[in-house]
Amino acid sequence: MHEVHQVQKVVAEALAAVKDKNIPHPKKAVLIVGELLGFDEGCIRLYWEQMIADTVLSNTVLEVKFKPALLECKTCNIQYPKKGSDLQCPQCRKLGTLLPSGKEFFITEIV
Ligand SMILES: [Zn+2]
């Protein structure tokens, strides 16, 4: 249910960016979504479509890119992406610590 507010925010940001950069007919917007948010791509798209109707973004295709959460192993001093529910370090198999990433939600590119 958090998707709606987040999408509202990025639509507002996208509209501002388009105005800023003077793009009359934006074709594509790339949205980065942190995997840890647990957002559903279908939901995001649905809200996006609803909110861009009747705006300059109405023909803008949304590309959703999921960003995996990162874990850190303090023993090996490495960072690695989280795969499903597997938290183990790929080298020493110890449990890694979740880094404060994977909660991103923003438009990275609009053309
Ligand atoms: Zn390790």
Image (spheres, grey):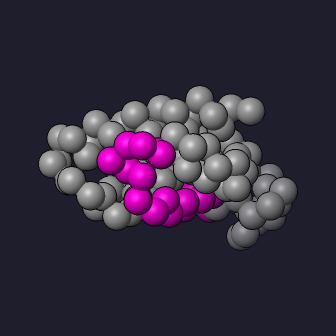
Residue at the right extreme, as displayed: 85
Relative to residue 108, is residue 1 depicted above or below? above
Quarter of the picture containing the N terminus is: top right
Q: Is residue 82 above or below residue 9?
A: below
* Front residue (pair 19, 108): 19
Front in this rendered view, residue 79 or 16? 16
Quadrant containing the C terminus in the rendered view: bottom left
Question: Residue 89 versus residue 61: which sits nearer the camera?
Answer: 61
Point out the residue furthest to the bottom here.
91
Q: Residue 67: x and y, percent? A: 57, 57
Residue 40 seen in the current view? yes
x, y (%) of residue 81?
Answer: 64, 61
Q: Position of residue 13 (x, y in %)?
A: 36, 36
Q: Quadrant of residue 37?
A: top right
The residue under the point 75% across, 64% down is 83
Q: Is residue 21 left or right of residue 6?
A: left
Residue extent of the magenta highlight: 52-80
Q: Is residue 54 magenta?
A: yes
Q: Is residue 109 left or right of residue 68?
A: left
Q: Was residue 19 drawn as part of the magenta stretch in this picture? A: no
Residue sitting at x 25%, y 46%: 18
Residue 50, how many percent across, how many down?
57, 44
Residue located at (48% from left, 46% from top):
53
Q: Is residue 26 above or below residue 12?
A: below
Instruction: Answer whether residue 74 is visible to the viewer in this image.
Output: no
